[in-house]
Amino acid sequence: MDITPPQLRAARALVDWSREELAKRADTTARTIARIEAGETVPRQSTLEAIRSALEAAGVEFIPENSGGAGVRLRKEKGRDYKNVI
């Protein structure tokens, strides 16, 4: 599954990472992240896999495209009560 530019921006926001932080964790450059997020480039598959792996390791789940559109969310941590989270 490909990651859309809006998914990538949302995923970074969920884990509160800068482009620089994601680039470091995915072994790429912040400029590459910016270009992908802006839709200016189609990344190599290896780059996309590294980005996905870094974000998934941080707890991001990518939701595939369907009638409601593609999305992202954080994995629910076992034992954590999300009812009281603002």
Image: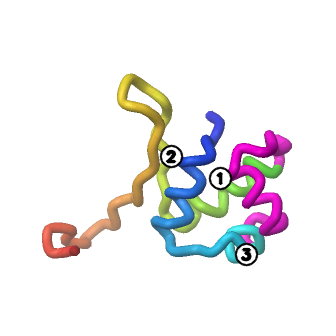
Q: In the picture shown, does residue 6 fall above or below 29?
A: above
Question: Residue at 54% across / 67% down in the picture?
Answer: 58
Magenta region includes residue 4 = no
Question: Is mark 3 in CB contact (under 8 Å) with mark 1?
Answer: no
Question: Is mark 2 in CB contact (under 8 Å) with mark 1?
Answer: yes
Q: Label 1 sits on what residue type?
A: Arg
Q: Secondary structure at mark 3?
A: helix
Q: Secondary structure at mark 1?
A: helix
Q: Which residue is mark 2?
A: 62
Residue 57 horizontal side relative to residue 63, left or right: right
- The disc placed on residue 52 is 1
Q: Nearer the viewer, mark 3 or mark 1?
A: 3
Q: Nearer the viewer, mark 3 or mark 2?
A: 3
Question: Residue at 14% across / 68% down in the picture?
Answer: 83
Nearest to the observer: residue 62 or residue 76: 62
How far, Cα to Cα, is label 3 from label 2?
A: 21 Å
Nearest to the observer: residue 78 or residue 3: 3
Question: Is mark 3 in CB contact (under 8 Å) with mark 2?
Answer: no
Image x and y of residue 12, in percent = 56, 64
Image x and y of residue 16, in percent = 51, 74
Who comes first in sequence, dot 3 or dot 1? 3
How packed mark 3 is, by other alpha carbons closer than 10 Å (few <14, some 14-19, many 20 or more), is some
Q: Which residues are magenta?
A: 25-46
How far, Cα to Cα, is label 2 from label 1?
A: 9 Å
- The disc placed on residue 20 is 3
Q: In the picture shown, does residue 42 fall above or below 25?
A: above
Q: Label 2 sits on what residue type?
A: Phe
Who comes first in sequence, dot 2 or dot 1? 1
How far, Cα to Cα, is label 3 from label 1?
A: 15 Å
